[in-house]
Amino acid sequence: MNSPSYTIAAVERDTGLSKDVLRMWERRYGFPVPERDGHGERLYPAAQVERLCAIKRLMDQGYRPGKLIAMPVEELSSLAPRRGAQARTKGATVDEPGQEELLTLLRQHDANGFVQALQQQLARQGLQRFVQDIVAPLTQQVGDAWEDGNFEVFEEHLFTELTKRVLRQAVASLPQGRGSPRVLLTSVPDEQHMLGLLMVEALLALEGAECIPLGAQMPVLEISRAAAAHRADIVALSFSVAFPARQLPKLLEPLRAALPADIELWVGGSGVLRLNPPAGVRRFSSLDQGVEALAAWRSEHAG
């Protein structure tokens, strides 16, 4: 069976490496080495795409591309788990009832069983505890397992998509918030991950906030325009650990400048844990902090 090949657009999407970077590496380092189709367009074998994904992950952790490209694939694979293990929060273990069952269902590729087990946990615990005690720690566990090579990419995607489906259904069943604050939730370009935003939306909606979800990857200018159009009180952004930390100030500073002074800018997620937030930007390291900040906002704006 022939190994699949991928266009440069597909490689850009799947790896997070731009087309310009891929072409530059090809010229400078002699890797990747794409084939050509009948029209002369680049086609990248699957093995090269997997190697590019590993390189990109390590670049986000601070390694230099020139050094990584020269490494054999086995050495690349050995670096990522070691870095991931060092960066993890101590005590991040599966200890809630039902979490190990959920991980097992994912490893068995039992999508229906996983969704049913999630829904049972939701019904048993209620939405708030479900988000904080099941979804949030399970997301960390799945990410760790992927870093260690114990989860495949498609298994991590399965977890994410099925969990988003259950959360969306749960949020849609809540009474529509008509109170304050009005919170616009989205992510910036190159941040595709939505699960963190859905967790925040669920908790804020439970508190009666009016949530305005815009999905992922909104251009910065459009975020500020949407905040004005919806008369938002708060713009909340989520950043996953995969988002390059060095890009955060370049995105947040102009967004803060574009927003009116009375609209707060909140950021959260694993990608901002070490961020020194720019002036006028509030950083949250946990879901609980976001809920506490909501209460503080209401107290400040009471009357």
Image (tube, rainbow, N blue to C red):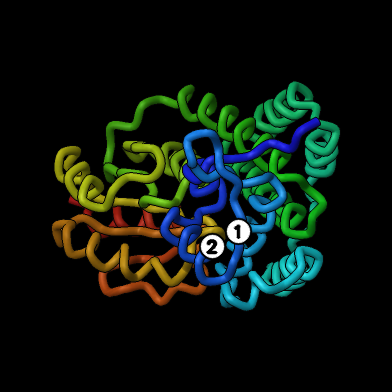
- Within 10 Å of disc 1 (Cα), the crowding (few <14, some 14-19, many 20+) is some
> Label 1's element?
loop
Q: Nearer the viewer, residue 3 or 54?
A: 3
The residue where tag 1 is placed is 32
Q: Quadrant of the N terminus?
A: top right
Q: Tell me, yes or no, if residue 194 can be seen here.
A: no
Residue 292: x %, y % from top left: 43, 57
Residue 255: x %, y % from top left: 24, 60
Residue located at (68% from left, 26% from top): 119
Residue 144: x %, y % from top left: 73, 57
Q: Amino acid at mark 2?
A: Glu
Residue located at (66% from left, 45% from top): 45
Residue located at (22% from left, 45% from top): 222
Left or right side of 38 for 73: right
First in sequence, mark 2 or 1: give its number.
2
The residue where tag 2 is placed is 26
Q: Amino acid at mark 1?
A: Pro
Q: Tell me, yes or no, if residue 209 can be seen here.
A: yes
